[in-house]
Image: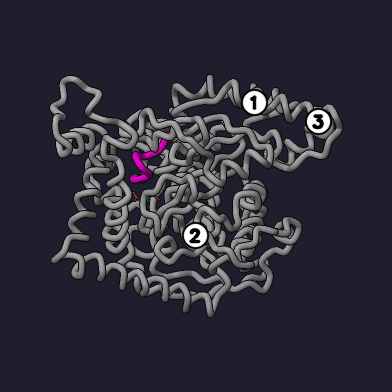
């Protein structure tokens, strides 16, 4: 058994055939983590005892010959901004260093009920702000394909945990690329579902009108299996869509077998222009050719407001960040300067100021400042309101293009994984690495990144990610196309 490569259906089969046990799998996961963690830094905390106990329960079920759910006994990891009862949820920040959650996020509750086993919480950029997993208060995470490079971010810990074989799948959160970009850099699958498909209850808010939880997996089938469990309405999240569009009853067999014949692929020109690495472009174009051979039709399309997406996002998201992060005041929960005898905290304002000064890192402070500025009276109309209007135009771009084509195909990122430290001191450069993932987040449409090959650089094989963008709640179509691509690329 090669634990580092096992997929969910293979695990299920092995349980049935008595070839492995849930305890053995958890032990293997912990062993791989023990071996690789020092180098990769993907985890912030581990749940050894609880994981082994949960595995024993699954093994008892197997011994009694009871029916097993498909996720039962499967070890997975949670990004550190998804809360779990009685466990810390640091969000990669010092300000939540000691915060223990009193409840389970809805996705955690659903996965626990499905019998999946949490191994631990993964490292992330502070409060999910970043594209490299270098801004965590705790550690930096490294790319398993080249340790001198970033894994992408902000869900870098989750992507690395899956790519390096530490767990079978992981959850990340994606506000504008944080599942897809690290998935692309690490050579795994990552889905940002339609906004409103998965409950955000228990996901610590960064920019609430954009945040979505998404699965990171070793292949498309696993992604469908996880998405099936975590998707759907939730009484605790009023933005989670309650009608029948939000159905997670994916038919795995048709997803795996329908192929792409007769489908119309849109190739948005704006994504293949300046700034795109030539080799990345060639890889994606090669896949487009393969799809054409399999009977898909391609059409060049345009999303004319793409150029404005980054600017729009970096006004709207800091605005929401500044509001969401206002709750960390040193009084209700999280780090408080009051506990430090050296800090002057004899009035309320000093408690706020000192706690926030100590507790937040630079990127969080930068966004709080920008966000407060664009929301302030006098600037609100010029920045925030204007950005909201541009967001509507970006959404309309997607709506009109989906009247003509079934889905869009683009690279996930303009370049391969960059070097650690390369963009850390240049926030604008860092922000630009999201140029291909931001627009679909602003529109709220589902988007999936999957590996489409590797490119050799400095004697290392670095993964290339391909992005599929679909119409609202058409995840099934994305899965179907992604399955076809997976087969073509792995031939
Ligand atoms: N990299 C983007 C940012 O820093 C997106 C982050 C995310 O998707 N959480 O805001």
Q: Which residue is mark 1?
A: 26
Q: Answer yes or no: is residue 449 visible.
A: no
Q: Which residue of the protein is positioned furthest toward the front in this rendering?
A: 347
Q: Earlier in the sequence, mark 2 or mark 1?
A: 1
Q: What are the residue bounds of the magenta stretch?
A: 123-129
Q: Earlier in the sequence, mark 2 or mark 3?
A: 3
Residue for point 62% across, 45% down: 110
Look at the picture and state if 109 lies above or below 98. below
**Residue name at image x 51 percent, y 45 percent:** 454
> Label 1 neighbourhood size at 10 Å, few (<14), some (14-19), many (20+)?
many
For label 2, the residue is 238
Query: Marks 3 and 1: in contact by CB < 8 Å?
Result: no
Question: Which one is in front in this view, the residue at disc 2 or the one at disc 3?
Answer: 2
457 relative to 139, above or below: below
Q: Is residue 293 left or right of residue 177?
A: right
Q: Is residue 239 visible?
A: yes
Counting other residues with Cα less than 10 Å from the Cα at mark 2, is it few (<14), some (14-19), or many (20 or more)? few
Disc 2 and disc 1 in contact, CB within 8 angstroms: no
In the displayed structure, would residue 114 be above or below residue 274?
above
Q: Label 3: which residue?
A: 62
């Amino acid at each position: 058994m090669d634990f580092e490569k096992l997929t969910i259906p293979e695990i299920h089969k092995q349980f049935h055939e008595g070839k492995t046990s849930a305890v053995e799998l958890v032990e293997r996961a912990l062993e791989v983590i023990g071996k690789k963690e020092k180098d990769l830094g993907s985890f912030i905390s581990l749940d050894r005892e609880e994981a082994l106990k949960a595995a024993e329960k699954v093994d008892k079920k197997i011994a009694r010959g009871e029916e097993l759910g498909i996720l039962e006994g499967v070890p997975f990891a949670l990004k550190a901004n998804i809360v779990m009862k009685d466990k810390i949820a640091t969000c990669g920040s010092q300000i939540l260093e000691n915060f223990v959650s009193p409840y389970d996020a809805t996705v955690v509750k659903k996965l626990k009920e499905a019998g999946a086993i949490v191994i631990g919480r993964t490292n992330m950029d502070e409060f999910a702000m970043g594209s490299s997993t270098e801004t965590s208060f705790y550690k930096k995470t490294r790319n398993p394909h080249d340790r001198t490079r970033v894994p992408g971010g902000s869900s870098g810990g989750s992507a690395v945990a899956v790519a390096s074989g530490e767990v079978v799948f992981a959850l990340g959160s994606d506000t504008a690329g944080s599942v897809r970009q690290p998935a692309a850099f690490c050579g795994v699958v990552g889905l940002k579902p339609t906004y409103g498909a998965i409950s955000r209850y228990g996901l610590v808010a960064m920019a609430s009108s954009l945040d979505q939880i998404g699965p990171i997996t070793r292949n498309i089938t696993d992604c469908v299996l996880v998405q099936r469990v975590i998707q759907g309405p939730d009484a605790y999240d009023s933005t989670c869509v309650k009608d029948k569009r939000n159905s997670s009853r994916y038919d795995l067999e048709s997803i795996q077998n329908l192929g792409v014949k007769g489908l119309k692929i849109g190739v948005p020109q704006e994504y293949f222009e300046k700034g795109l690495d030539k080799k990345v472009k060639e890889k994606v174009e090669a896949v487009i050719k393969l799809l054409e051979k399999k009977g898909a039709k391609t059409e060049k399309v345009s999303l004319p407001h793409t150029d404005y997406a980054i600017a729009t996002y970096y006004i709207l998201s800091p605005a929401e960040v500044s509001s969401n992060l206002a709750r960390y005041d040193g009084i209700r929960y999280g780090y408080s300067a009051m506990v430090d005898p050296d800090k002057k905290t004899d009035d309320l304002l000093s408690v706020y100021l000192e706690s926030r000064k100590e507790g937040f890192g630079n990127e969080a402070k930068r966004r709080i400042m920008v966000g407060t500025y664009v929301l302030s009276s006098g600037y609100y109309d010029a920045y925030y309101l204007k950005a909201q209007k541009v967001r509507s135009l970006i959404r309309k771009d997607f709506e009109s293009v989906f009247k003509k084509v079934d889905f869009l195909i683009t690279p996930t990122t303009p370049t391969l994984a960059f070097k650690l430290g390369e963009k850390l001191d240049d926030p604008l450069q860092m922000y630009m690495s999201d140029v291909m993932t931001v627009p679909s987040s602003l529109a709220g449409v589902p988007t999936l990144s999957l590996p489409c090959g590797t490119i050799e650089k400095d004697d290392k094989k670095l993964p290339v990610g391909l992005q599929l963008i679909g119409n609202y709640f058409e995840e099934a179509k994305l899965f179907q196309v992604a399955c076809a691509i997976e087969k073509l690329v792995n031939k």
